[in-house]
Amino acid sequence: MNTAIAIERCRSFIDCHLQTKNRPPVATHPLQQEPAITISRQTGSGAFVVGEKLAACLQAKDSTATCPWTVMDHQLAEKVLDEHNLPKKFAQFMPEEKLSFVEDMMEEVLGLHPSSWTLARKTMETILHLAQMGHVILVGWGANLITAKMPNVFHVRLVGTLEKRIEHLQKAYNFSARDAAEFVKKTDRGRVRYIKQHFNCDVDDPLAYHMVVNTSRMSFDDTARVIADAALRHFEAYAASFQQEGTVSLTGGK
């Protein structure tokens, strides 16, 4: 992943929404929100690659999008810091990958950074803002749980065999097999702990998602296409529910 390009896309995404903010509203229900997608993932299951391909699929199929579909992954940390005016050095302490609650508490006592709870709350606020803007694919950070009650958001979980995930990390980041295996196990443990600590939920619970995809059995291209098709059907049903409500209201029904 080219970080500079990803950051620039996110800035363009925000700028687009700022520019469209003052445009005349389209004729939709006032409570209807633009579509968004969350991707939860096991480490090495190809979430960012799938996210980029998914954004391209959606952009090609969704002619109504006023702003380009954009993926928010690691650069979300910078967006959080920018939005809440936190010093850049705090980026290294963003909580998703935290493995030790004791270490976190000690760092807080020593005054090294805001508590992970404070940063988690600010991250949640940012995710909600982005989801309300729409046309965004939010990867990680418990975004599916934060936006669980927003009907405009479609939730996906990517999984894969340990062997395939290690293989992907070796190719993507030039890791050795040993380093990739250690990274997968360490990062997955951190994410499980983060979701449990802040949401008291099991990140592997399939009921928290609209769909779970095994990228060990499907290519990243096919995974993106399957998600795009399912998500667009979900968004169409969501939009239709508002149109039906408006029709009933205009005809004097209940």
Image: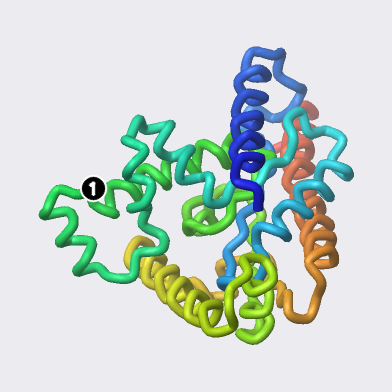
Can you say which quadrant of the picture contains the C terminus? top right
Residue 150: x %, y % from top left: 57, 48
Residue 91: x %, y % from top left: 38, 46
Q: On the rendered structure, is 249 left or right of 92? A: right
Of residues 151 and 173, the one nearer the viewer is 173
Amino acid at pointer 1: His
Other residues around mark 1 within 10 Å, as few (<14) / some (14–19) / many (≥20): some
**Which structural element holds mark 1?**
loop
Q: On the rendered structure, is 42 left or right of 237? A: left
Q: On the rendered structure, is 200 left or right of 248? A: left
Of residues 37 and 242, the one nearer the viewer is 37
Question: Can the viewer see residue 190?
Answer: yes
**Residue 15 to residue 73: above or below:** above
Question: Can the viewer see residue 152?
Answer: no
- For label 1, the residue is 113
Residue 169: x %, y % from top left: 63, 72
Q: Which residue is at 76% across, 55% downward? A: 231
Quarter of image, res 100: bottom left
Q: Which residue is at 60% across, 31% downward? A: 11
Q: Which residue is at 32% across, 66% downward? A: 197
The colouring scheme, among rainbow, by chain, secondary structure or one colour, is rainbow
Of residues 182 and 216, the one nearer the viewer is 182
Of residues 16 and 125, the one nearer the viewer is 16
Q: Which residue is at 81% across, 47% downward? A: 56
**Residue 215 to residue 233: above or below:** below
